[in-house]
Amino acid sequence: MDLLILFIMGMCFATVVFFVGRFACPRHDRVPLIEVDHVLLWTTLRRGWHAMGSLGPTPPGRSGPSGSHPA
């Protein structure tokens, strides 16, 4: 039962990541859902993962341009 719950939670998370990746892609580059194959699935999941990762907070020490230090 626990594995079933983990599987369902994982599929829900993958679905959210997929749709974030799908909407992160420009409209003219989107492929209809019926034509998505395994390569486009993994590409869209990767795009969604990176899009969600870019929404997080900036790590310390990386807030400014390279080489600039606060006075």
Image: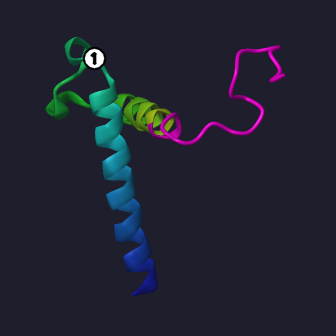
Q: Is residue 23 magenta?
A: no
Tell me which residue sits at (38%, 78%) in the image: 4
Q: In which quarter of the image is residue 59?
A: top right
Q: Quadrant of residue 48?
A: top left
For the C terminus, the image quarter is top right
Q: Name the residue under label 1.
A: 26
Compared with 58, 67 (above or below) is above
| Near-viewer residue (59 or 3) | 59
Q: Which residue is pictured at 33% across the width and 27% down the height? A: 24
Across and down, in percent, residue 47 comes to 44, 30
54 in relation to 10, above or below: above
Q: Which residue is drawn at 32% across and 22% down?
A: 25
Residue 42 drawn at (x, y percent):
43, 35
Q: Where is residue 12 in the image (x, y as percent from the top left)?
A: 32, 60
Q: Pick the residue in front: 51 or 38.
A: 51
Crowding at dot 1, Cα within 10 Å, few <14 / some 14-19 / many 20+, comes out as few
Q: What residue type is labelled 1?
A: Pro
Which quarter of the image is occupied by the N terminus? Answer: bottom left
Position of residue 33 in the picture relative to residue 23 (left or right) = left
Please state which of residues 54 and 47 is positioned toward the viewer in this rendering. Answer: 54
Secondary-structure class at tag 1: loop
What's the magenta region?
A: 52-71
Residue closest to the eye, 71 or 38:
71
